[in-house]
Image (cartoon, rainbow, N blue to C red):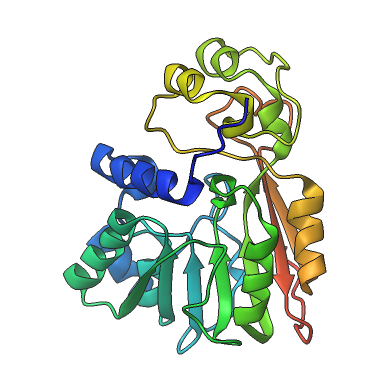
Amino acid sequence: MQDMVVDPAAHNRAAWDRYVQEGNGWTRPVSTEDVERARGGDWSIVLIGCEPVERSWLPTDLTGKDVLCLASGGGQQGPILAAAGARVTVFDNSPRQLGQDQMVAARDGLELRTVLGDMRDLGAFGDAAFDVVFHPVSNVFVPDVAPVWRECFRVLRPGGTLLAGFLNPDVYLFDHEALDERGELVVAHKLPYSDVTQYSAEERATKFGADAALEYSHTLTGQIGGQLAAGFVLTGFAEAPHQSNATAPYMSGYFAPRRGQPGFTARVAK
């Protein structure tokens, strides 16, 4: 059933450009009021679910820190971190998502760099270029995650921090229509799951719409083991429910390991 001609990066770039036009929740920029509060030290950003990330997971003082917001366009996390004092680069596959960050930066007088590209290839950046990589739930849109972790490790400085959120792969066990339309947990898919291998192009168009972004589940070996294989050490862990999903009463929908480069001094989140 695999569709051999699909280019996931090109397809998902077009999909997210459309999502910006449609006002998807992850494309809506922060307000000027949010930016002003961040300038005054009152800020938060989301890594998984709807809860703000633990402030202790980030440097106590972001002033002058080089932060890469990886696959994190949309005018949300990047502008807040820039207002808090960081030197921010937002890297994303969607020009329109990056346009949201550019709009906020122009509107509110922020210094913020945007770079277009595939999260699996950070060749635009030199080695040891960043103190923090902030990577919210987005690697669901690429078929392979090992290159993402290798590139994150390469661009982080010794002692740097990777904050990465991802979906619990078990969410993909269930039939989409039963889950979304009736709230029923009907096991239908073998893991790891892929829209491309599970359905033909015609079936995808019927179930999700022809222009919907392609999604791929990844094993925990690929997610957590892949980060370890890239050289990271584990310094924290969090999980959260998938609040818009019928699985929420039964299991966590999101995971977020906090990783450090060797030389990182771990702080335990309370």
Q: Give the quarter of the image for residue 42.
A: bottom left
Q: Is residue 192 visible?
A: yes
User: 16 or 179: nearer the eye?
Assistant: 16
Q: Residue 173: horizontal and vertical position, in percent?
A: 71, 26
Q: Could you tell me if residue 234 is visible in this image?
A: no
Residue shown at the point (47%, 51%) measured from the top left: 9
Q: Quadrant of residue 196?
A: top right
Residue shown at 72% from the left, 69% from the top? 259
The image position of residue 146, as x and y in percent, is: 70, 60
- Please give the name of the residue rendered at 63% of the width and 26% of the height, measured from the top-left corner: 198
Classify residue 148 as left or right of residue 50: right
- Residue 217, compared with residue 142, is above or below; it is above
Quarter of the image that includes the C terminus: bottom right
In the image, 27: left or right of 132? left
Q: Quadrant of the N terminus?
A: top right
* Residue 211 shown left or right of residue 261 in the figure: left
Vertically, is 230 above or below 9?
A: below
The residue closer to the viewer here, 243 or 89, is 89
Q: How many marks?
A: 0
As drawn, is 22 to the left or to the right of 154? left
